[in-house]
Image (cartoon, rainbow, N blue to C red):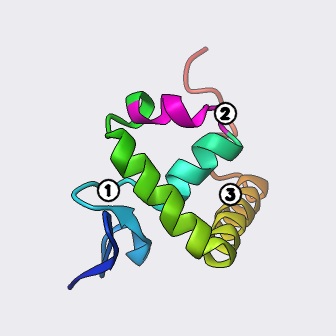
Amino acid sequence: MNEILTLGITRKTGVRGGRPCIEGTGIRVTDIVIAERYGECARDEIPDEFDITCEQVAAAFVYYENNSAYIDADIQRQFDNFDRLAKAGYGRPEAKILS
């Protein structure tokens, strides 16, 4: 089921973990916020980096501003999961693949 959350932002069950995405793409609102906040990407560079329009970026930030507690908590969960998996050795082979 495709749920319209706000103008330009949708959520679809089973797609991208049910997280809010830019309509017609698989780009999550969290991806846009992370790019600006942690990726050292200026807001005006995001459209080129993600191959989306300025209007789509603006829609993502409007959604974020109205739902920042939810989005910030989701970003923190993603970072926590990454750290947990990295500590468990995922993504880091024990032996070199190539000599």
How many neighbours does mark 1 have within 10 angstroms: few (below 14), some (14-19), or many (20 or more)?
some
Q: Position of residue 42 (x, y in %)?
A: 61, 32
Q: Is residue 40 above or below residue 75?
A: above
The magenta segment is 39-47
Q: Give the CA separation, mark 1 to mark 2.
A: 34 Å
Query: Which residue was labeled with disc 1?
Result: 26
Residue type indicated by callout 2:
Ala
Q: Is residue 19 magenta?
A: no
Q: Give the CA separation, mark 2 to mark 3.
A: 21 Å
Residue type indicated by callout 1:
Gly
For label 3, the SS is helix
The quarter of the rendered structure image containing the C terminus is: top right
> Which residue occupies the foreground of this view, 84 or 50?
50
Q: Is residue 12 above or below residue 32?
A: below
Q: Is residue 91 visible?
A: no
Query: Which residue was labeled with disc 3?
Result: 82
Q: Is residue 3 above or below residue 71?
A: below
User: Which tag, 1 or 2, sits closer to the chain's start?
Assistant: 1
Residue found 57% across the figure and 74% down from its top: 66
Cβ–Cβ under 8 Å for marks 3 and 1: no
Mark 1 or mark 2: which is in front?
A: 1
> Which residue occupies the foreground of this view, 87 or 10?
10
Residue type indicated by callout 3:
Phe
Q: Is residue 27 left or right of residue 99?
A: left
Quarter of the image for residue 39 reads top right
Task: State the mark number for residue 95.
Answer: 2
The quarter of the rendered structure image containing the N terminus is: bottom left
Q: Position of residue 77 (x, y in %)?
A: 68, 70
Q: Is residue 37 left or right of residue 54?
A: right
Cβ–Cβ under 8 Å for marks 2 and 3: no
Q: Is residue 40 magenta?
A: yes
Mark 3 or mark 1: which is in front?
A: 1
